[in-house]
Image (cartoon, rainbow, N blue to C red):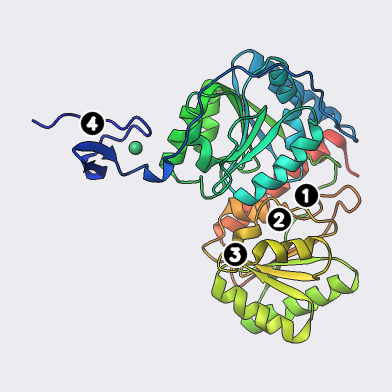
Amino acid sequence: MESFFVCENCGNSNKKYIGIRNGIKYCRLCLEFSGKKVKYVKNNPINAKPLLNYELTNEQKEISLKVTTNFIKNKNTLIYAVCGAGKTELVYDVISYALKKGMQVGFTIPRREVVIELAHRIKSTFPKAKVICVYGGQTEILEGNIIVLTTHQLFRYPNFFDLLIFDEIDAFPYKGNELLKIMFKKSIRGNYVIMSATPSKEIIKEIKNSGQILTLFTRFHLYEIPEPKIYYGFLFTKIIITLYKTHKYIKNHKPVLIFAPTIGIATYLFETIKKFIKNGGLVHSKVKSNSSIINDFKKGKLNYLVTTSVLERGITIKGLQVIIFNADHDIYDKETLVQIAGRVGRKKEEPTGDIIFLITRITTAISASMIDIREKNEYLHSVYGTN
Ligand SMILES: [Zn+2]
């Protein structure tokens, strides 16, 4: 009779994914998650107050305190905060607490580009702490006071994090990846804090059972989230509007991000626009020099960028204006539309801006995203009045 095999790494027992090498059974399901692992040790306690050169709003302070209280009480937290709320600041207090206790602190995010940026930010907030970055291609140093890592690297830390912060839980490649979910849960020794602007029903339910949901529906600068402006038309009209708007924004010295649903449409659109408007760029998953193009755009060297969903999150640029070409495409669910709209007006110096949906028909995702944004703005007015 065949002996039963359960993978220690991912818990798989399905024979379909079990191989035999030199007479020894191994799991094929989680092969990509093999490599050096780290054993839990207690860190040296560090007295490190977050170093910030700006003040948190009262609401931010209040939530930040609640996050720490939950953590002390062994409760998990979901921070459900709108795009541009200033989420990262909400966990500095709890990180500071954990460092003081010599606990293992992790900060995980699905996408690698965000990991590097985030680590810089955390390093400057906690200069006394050893902040390390772990992602595919960067796995030499695995230990530190604060470990900033992609969700793909969580497998290296079984039963390890006393405090694990998880940002963008609804983003790819974590979203829909069952193995990554297992690795996430296995890496937790203490409690976790999840942050999202668009949490799924599943996560809301999970936190209801294991902790507390904290909401922050106002942006840190207390301006509205810009509501999408809808323009109807077929291809030719949509291109004319894109050209007209992009030209207008650039004339007013505003950077423009133009989203397209597929690489094909993005390429076609870019080829068309660049005949009329110079100094633009194109980014999508197949472009090798993506990060240098994005950097040029951030620095103002490029006036506009045509992009697929690769830039739907994590980008903050002063004065940014956004156009979604074919926002009625199936690829755009409510969450994606809310995230993309959330790129606009994130800076205190320029808290407003345009978000344009170019469509031929209204989809349920479009109406749901409009309702979502409107609800949050109504909340803002109900609490702070009209400004
Ligand atoms: Zn496995």
Q: For the residue with label 4, is its CB less than 8 Å from the closest atom of ligand 1?
A: no
Task: Give 299 or 247, whichever is nearer the viewer.
Answer: 299
Q: Are marks 2 and 4 in contact (CB under 8 Å)?
A: no
Mark nearer the N terminus (2 vs 3):
2
Q: Identify the image quadrant of residue 364.
A: bottom right
The disc at residue 5 is: 4
Percent from the top left, x then y, of residue 139? Answer: 56, 42
> Secondary structure beneath disc 3?
loop
Type of amino acid at the residue the image marks with label 1: Ile
Query: Contact, CB < 8 Å: mark 2 with mark 3?
Result: no
Q: Which residue is mark 3?
A: 362
What whole-number distance in Å separates the C-alpha atoms at marks 1 and 2?
8 Å
Which label sits in the foreground, 1 or 3?
1
Vertical order, 86 against 280 (above or below): above
Three-letter residue code for mark 3: Ile
Which label's residue is closer to the chain start, 4 or 3? 4
Which amino acid type corresponds to the residue marked 2 in the rendered image? Answer: Ala
Q: Amino acid at mark 4?
A: Phe
Instruction: Measure how far apart labels 1 and 4 are at the Cα level.
Output: 52 Å
Report which residue position mark 2 lands on. Answer: 341
Tell me if residue 321 can be seen.
Answer: no
Mark 1 — residue?
225
Q: Are marks 4 and 3 in contact (CB under 8 Å)?
A: no
Query: Residue 3, percent across and down?
Result: 15, 29
**Quarter of the image that includes the N terminus:** top left
Q: What whole-number distance in Å separates the C-alpha atoms at marks 2 and 4? A: 48 Å
